[in-house]
Image: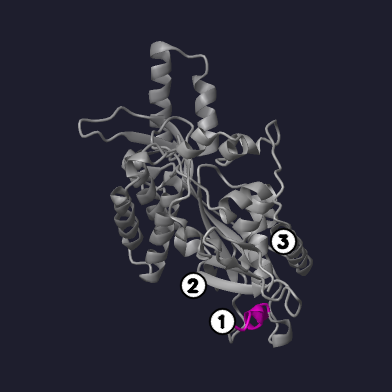
């Protein structure tokens, strides 16, 4: 029987995933060291744990029929459990994450913002963490090899939802039905019945947390979403992208409101025009307005100093509030956290191309196993600096002291085959 590789526990692995192929394509030697030999970095980043807690909060909110606060409570409970981990004191935080306490506030604001945005998102009757398997070479000598994918969300929104790429109205006949993909999933996979009214479409949504905005106009080029489309033959794919920001507020920051204020509705997006001084209770007023208002403010204040500047700011804010172009909001009711939603519809040709790419990489993985040769593909200079950030570099550099300090082979149960599942 053909296998992809034999892991460090001596078990034959016959299934791959997006993440395993990405590692192999990035550097076959890194794939060998991690997936085959079982080395892993001792570094534990808070971002991974935080992302899981956000996804759990999102799922809890939806599965509780969008009960107010249910997502927030689930996130808080799981994030508090992070403190119980043996490696808690060694967690690594990025600048935008700050600390465990800061991420606690970040997560609560994200969950609140999701509650506000959810009614306008194409998330309808969602199914979470759907595990699918697909033969890569059915009916050949490599028939045993499979691809495994776990969909964060499979949703069934209206075919004409405003957040999705336009498609023509669906005729009544099943031959041209946009949800015919439901009938073509693998026999051993989940079954989804097509909508009898032919008024919904299937949508794959991948949930991510990041410190950077996603270039939403490029979503159709994302390779992970493209693989999900090929795996399921569902052409509509999307990202639900949670962006982590800090909590300090200053002029020019882009923010969202978490509660109605004046003429602003919950979820309104705009900019900080100016901030006030904190009061005795620590509450600070934040003055919000549009981009145009911010530009007028900065143009008018440019070059002013001292009392003249103070007088201009006071008059500008008073006039703006009186005219409705500026609203004063408590700093507790605004957030710099962001939620992006971006969707794309792939063509049959694009999905077929992905399948060919998966097949090609899989053959290369089989060949590497059979020859017991995983090529080292180093890169140390711009723009190919992958070795600079690779935790396996100490092995490639033959530095056993640094290797033992930064890497471990303990806990090899993560290589029992289940690790190959793509958890995003």
Which residue in the protein does label 2 denote? Answer: 127
Q: Quadrant of the C terminus?
A: bottom right
Q: Residues within 10 Å of mark 1 (few under 14, many from 20)?
A: few
Q: In terms of image quadrants, where is residue 172?
A: bottom right
Q: Quadrant of the N terminus?
A: bottom right
Q: Is residue 278 left or right of residue 201?
A: left
Q: In terms of image quadrants, where is residue 200?
A: bottom right
Q: Residues within 10 Å of mark 3 (few under 14, many from 20)?
A: few
Coordinates of residue 180 in the picture (x, y in percent): 67, 81
Q: Is residue 32 left or right of residue 90?
A: right
Coordinates of residue 388 in the picture (x, y in percent): 61, 34
Among numbered discs 2 and 3, the one appearing first in the sequence? 2
Front: mark 1 or 3 = 3
In this figure, what is the number of numbered marks? 3
Coordinates of residue 414 in the picture (x, y in percent): 47, 59
Q: Are marks 1 and 2 in contact (CB under 8 Å)?
A: yes
Q: Are marks 1 and 3 in contact (CB under 8 Å)?
A: no
Secondary structure type for disc 3: helix
Q: Residue at x 29, y 56 (%)?
A: 77
Q: Is residue 188 above or below residue 397?
A: below
Q: Residue at x 51, y 32 (%)?
A: 294
Which residue in the protein does label 3 denote? Answer: 370
Q: Are marks 2 and 3 in contact (CB under 8 Å)?
A: no
Q: Is residue 415 left or right of residue 100?
A: right
Residue 344 visible in the current orientation: no
Could you say which is closer to the camera, residue 240 or residue 184? 184
Could you say which is closer to the camera, residue 26 or residue 37? 37
Task: Give the magenta-colored segment's residue range.
Answer: 178-189
Marks 2 and 3, Cα distance to the nearest angstrom?
39 Å
Q: Residue at x 47, y 35 (%)?
A: 253
């Amino acid at each position: 029987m053909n296998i992809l590789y034999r892991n460090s526990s001596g078990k034959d692995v016959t299934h791959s995933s997006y993440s395993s192929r990405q590692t192999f394509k990035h550097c076959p030697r890194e794939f060998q060291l991690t997936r085959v030999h079982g080395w892993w970095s001792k570094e534990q980043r808070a971002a991974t744990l935080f992302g899981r807690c956000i996804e759990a909060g999102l799922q809890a909110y939806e599965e509780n029929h969008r009960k107010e606060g249910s997502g927030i409570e689930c996130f808080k409970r799981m994030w508090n459990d992070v403190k119980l981990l043996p490696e808690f004191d060694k967690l690594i935080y990025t600048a935008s994450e700050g600390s465990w306490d800061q991420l606690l506030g970040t997560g609560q604001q994200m969950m609140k913002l999701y509650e506000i945005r959810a009614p306008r998102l194409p998330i309808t009757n969602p199914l979470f963490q759907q595990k699918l398997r697909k033969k890569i070479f059915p009916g050949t000598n490599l028939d045993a090899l499979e691809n495994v994918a776990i969909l964060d969300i499979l949703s069934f929104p209206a075919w004409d939802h405003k957040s999705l790429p336009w498609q023509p109205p669906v005729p009544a006949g099943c031959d041209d039905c946009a949800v015919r993909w439901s009938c073509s999933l693998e026999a051993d996979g989940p079954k989804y019945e097509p909508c009898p009214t032919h008024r919904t479409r299937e949508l794959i949504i991948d949930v991510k947390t990041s410190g950077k905005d996603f270039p939403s106009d490029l979503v159709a080029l994302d390779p992970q979403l493209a693989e999900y489309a090929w795996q399921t033959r569902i052409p509509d794919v999307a990202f639900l992208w949670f962006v982590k920001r800090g909590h300090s507020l200053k002029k020019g920051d882009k923010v969202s409101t978490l509660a109605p204020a004046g003429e602003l509705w919950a979820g309104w997006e705009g900019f900080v025009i100016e901030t006030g001084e904190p009061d005795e209770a620590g509450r600070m007023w934040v003055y919000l307005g549009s981009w145009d208002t911010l530009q007028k403010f900065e143009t008018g204040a440019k070059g002013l100093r001292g009392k003249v500047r103070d007088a201009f700011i006071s008059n500008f804010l008073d006039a703006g509030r009186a005219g409705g172009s500026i609203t004063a909001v408590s700093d507790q009711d605004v957030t710099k956290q962001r939620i992006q939603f971006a969707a794309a519809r792939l063509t049959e040709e694009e999905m077929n191309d992905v399948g060919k790419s998966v097949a090609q990489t899989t053959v290369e993985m089989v060949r590497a196993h059979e020859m017991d040769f995983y090529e080292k593909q180093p890169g140390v200079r711009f723009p190919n600096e992958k070795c600079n950030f690779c935790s396996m570099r100490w092995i490639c550099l033959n530095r056993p002291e640094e290797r033992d300090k930064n890497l471990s082979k303990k806990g090899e149960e993560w290589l029992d085959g289940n690790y190959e599942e793509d958890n995003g």
